[in-house]
Image: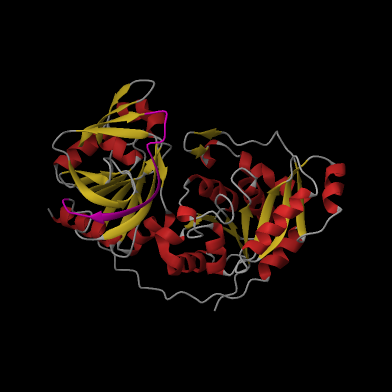
Amino acid sequence: MRSIPRVIVAGTHSGCGKTTLASGLMAALAARGLAVQPFKVGPDFIDPTHHSAICGRRSRNLDPFMMGEAGVRETFVRASAGADIAVVEGVMGLYDGLDGTDIASTADVAKILDAPVLLAVDAKGASRSVHATVRGYAAFDPGVRVAGVVFNRVGSPRHRALIEATQSLPVYGWVPRRDDLVVASRHLGLAMAAETGAMAGFGSVVEASCDLGGIMDLARSAPPLPAPVEGPDLPAMGVRIGVARDAAFCFYYSDNLDRLRQAGADLVFFSAMTDRLPDVDALYLGGGYPELHAEALSASRCREDVHRAVDDGMPVYAECGGLAYLTERLVTGEGDYPMAGVLPATTEMTDRIQGLGYVEARVVGGAPVLAPGSAFRGHEFHYSRLDCASDARFALELLRGRGIDGGRDGLIAQNAVGQYTHAYFPEGFSGTLVRAAAAYRQT
């Protein structure tokens, strides 16, 4: 058993301030010299970049739909090793889960981790009524320990006094309204941490307005968790997998990268905008914002290197933004840009969401980087769509999700596959890619 002080910062709804509160709490605790391990409930890629920048420890996703309950506990306990406290940022409202259930909700994760919940409540425009909200959330599911509340956007000392006149749960903070601390957003969510340091600015606000000692005591009240059974890392396979990681390709689950290493691969990070393709045996192209960097991607000789590598038989696995990069052209509002020209399709950016939600996929064949008959889960969120050639081949059948073409995903060309699905790698998934890289290296 392992004792891991932990607290989950949940919200009543999206936009109530839980992201700024969670990030500010991480920053305030880190400023006190504590080792803070951050987590994010759900499939989000962007909030974890802010957590990681603030804490200096890689933030991890906790998603019961993609990972399963055992996977959530294993990732949590493993990643929390050496930390003084784990802070988990929730998703949406506390009880908002898959298809109107609590599956994959913040409440679901709170129960899996037996963690106390700190509820962020937006107090703007209300006073005594906020206690009805708090009591409703606290009583809704007896299996969830809503242990305290932080009131956000408190307008004045008078506003606070009106709320304090009534009691509900213990109050751990009174965060004032701060319109000067704003994190810019774009079509897929907040700006990435590399583009703004505004989120860390909430640390001083939380330090001044929250009871950090009380929150630490709350976190220490969480009971021990079973230690995970550690599987052995496979011996090094002598293969190198290139991972495009820059402003254009920045959406990766940390667990996926870990599993590639555990399967015996060395990861070589590079920029598809500024670097030539490194000496590697396979490619992993994640999601991100190729549409914002289309001109640089098109001008870089890396796209020609990728094209030649695929012609040579190199295995390539690409997700969402990486999928767009592998197509023939990327059409945005600013222009029509040549891409790697590997997959028989054109990518077009639109002003509407084309796919959003969880995905269940089954491999129906055709790509050596995906084991035939295997299945995995993931998530999709994209504003682009593909115009595919009439003879396009697909590796994936979706039991849930939209994909490229109404339930089909995983466009194939030679040993390359590109899909809209951001997969959470199940056991064996990474090994298939590593073995494909090893086979290519031998040729």
Say which quadrant the N terminus sits in.
bottom right
Residue 86 lies in quadrant: bottom right
Using the image, determine if residue 438 lies above or below residue 322. Answer: below
Residue 159 placed where, x, y %? 83, 43
Residue 124 placed where, x, y %? 74, 41
Viewer-closest of 308 and 285: 285
Viewer-closest of 299 and 376: 376
Can the viewer see residue 81 in this picture?
no
Viewer-closest of 179 and 110: 110
Residue 302 placed where, x, y %? 28, 35
Highlighted magenta segment, given as a residue range = 350-366
Residue 169 lies in quadrant: bottom right
Q: How many marks?
A: 0
Q: Is residue 353 magenta?
A: yes
Using the image, determine if residue 120 lies above or below residue 307. Answer: below
Q: Residue at x 16, y 57 (%)?
A: 439
Residue 418 lies in quadrant: top left
Does 128 sit left or right of 103 as displayed?
A: right
Q: Residue at x 28, y 53 (%)?
A: 240
Q: Residue furthest bottom?
A: 1
Residue 248 placed where, x, y %? 40, 36
Using the image, determine if residue 266 lies above or below residue 251. Answer: below
- Report the coloring of the rendering: secondary structure
Q: Is residue 77 magenta?
A: no
Can the viewer see residue 277 in this picture?
yes
